[in-house]
Amino acid sequence: MIKELFNRFIHFSENTINRIENSKTPLYYFIFTFLLIIQLRNLLEDFSGDTGLGLMAHIHFILYYVCILSAILLIIKLITKEKTLKTFRPFSLFFSFILLGPTIDIIFTGFRNRNISYVFPESIKEIIIRFFTFFGKYTDMGATPGMRIHLFIILSLIFIYTLVKTNKNIKKSIFSVFLSYCILFISSILPTIIKFLTSVNYNDQFLSLLFFVLSIFLITILFYLNNKHFFKIILKDMRLTRMLFYILMILLGVAIGYKNYDMLRYGLPEFLFINILTLIICLMLGIFFSIVTNNIVDYNIDKISNKERPLFKENFPLKDYILFGIICLILSLFGAFIVSYLGFFFIFLFIGNYFIYSMPPIRLKRIPIFSKLTISLNSLFLTLLGFSLFLESSDVIHLTSFPTEYIIFFLLFTLAANFIDIKDYEGDKKEGIKTLPVLLGLETSKKLIAFLFILPFLFTGFLNPDLMIICILLSIVNLLLITDKNYNEKYLFLIMLFSIIAYILTLFIYIPI
């Protein structure tokens, strides 16, 4: 009798899950529903407690649930082998039970403030006790009775889902629940872990940054596991040397800020390291968006010069490629906004500048020499972005303390940046894009660009006499690489990256007094 009831229950659960997973309802409906559930939870939590919720607290909790869901989906993926986009549909609905926790607390306390919060064990022993007692005893804050009920329901649904997908494998189902509970418990004591491991005075902004970074990491893993083929194609098109160059521009700005910062008076800026990591992730996402838009509009050119690009790979859908770019854009701007207004401002300028460079109606890349102003300005924007992390206030644009010599350097780099058009010579010539190599001819332009490339190096040596000999030697090496018959852009980039890294290190060695 019990076995028959169990089989009926599993059959019913399987039909329900399959109906949700195979629903013709667009995926983004489920995404919006999930986000709405989180916001309703925030509202109920505000009513059930007396702490109040500001903008950054809302962002913190949204990213908290996104991170938790991503981690659980990863566990489900590894155990059941189901596709994550399919699994997301029922799990986005499972999370509707997070509304139950504060609702129960409100009903049973009559709006007398029962604060749902992180759990704060004070020792390793207490952490272990709380783990094995389902979050331990509730006092004034922590895991409320309502919260424990909704967590128990969600863990039960995870058990049922895994049971259905693994053909009633009890061991795998229990294991998935155990791992999910570990994720939920670790996330609930995260402030304590931060306190044990670091000296950071965390707040909603710090936790938002942390969950943003973790969410991007988990989503990237899920993307790889679900579609390794597309992931590898996109990864090959990431243009690693150029991405590293722009990452170094942020670090250059950080180094300049460090050199000009009164460290003894102010100490390290708040959340400096996680801000840098977040901005690098936002930069990479912004670059991916720029690559997507550039590849779409340069389709005919790339057919000649860059046949390895994703759109020429077999079975790579244009619709999915565009969607990937849009998602990268949204995440890039959202993450930068969490860091600061200036973070959002400069990342937005960076992305917008590349859009103007490569996309109609302006398509600045068609204008010789001056089109490279985009690259120089973007380098400057990212340097200012790194520098802004040391400003006393990032709410107001106040960058007058930025050394003007670096602005001159980037203007000189505008002329040298024409080297990126050398490898696209054939494609640009066929499409009628008037780059310097197309206008002057390949060999003549290579000689001119080699000369122009010397200018920023000599200027750096002029500002730093101790580095003059190294700058001259690097200039000669670059000249030989550019004018070489077997020109390879990769080697030029490697020399440039090495030069920037060395210069950044010289700035960090300097200790402010």
Image (cartoon, rainbow, N blue to C red):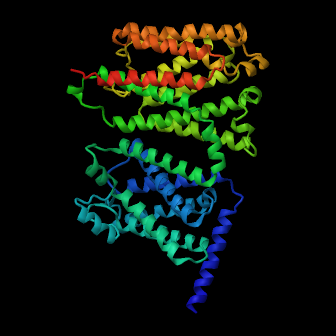
Does residue 157 show up?
A: yes
Give x and y (percent) for residue 448.
61, 7
Residue, x 37% and y 62% (percent of image)? 185
Residue, x 64% and y 11% (percent of image)? 446
Q: Looking at the rendering, which quadrant does residue 490 occupy?
A: top right
- Rendered view: 46 above or below 484: below
Q: Looking at the rendering, which quadrant does residue 442 occupy?
A: top right
- Rendered view: 277 above or below 377: below
- Rendered view: 107 above or below 341: below
In the foreground, 109 or 73: 73
Q: Is 83 on the left-hand or right-hand side of 123? A: right
Give x and y (percent) for residue 36.
53, 52
Does residue 326 show up?
A: no
Image quarter of the C terminus: top left
Q: Residue furthest right?
A: 430
Q: Is 239 on the left-hand or right-hand side of 342? A: right
In the foreground, 133 or 411: 411
Image quarter of the N terminus: bottom right
Give x and y (percent) for residue 200.
28, 43
Q: Is 19 on the left-hand or right-hand side of 154? A: right
In the foreground, 395 or 359: 359
Residue, x 50% and y 27% (percent of image)? 246
Q: Is 294 on the left-hand or right-hand side of 431? A: left
Number of marks drawn:
0
In the foreground, 313 or 39: 313
Give x and y (percent) for residue 461.
40, 10
Residue, x 37% and y 16% (percent of image)? 402
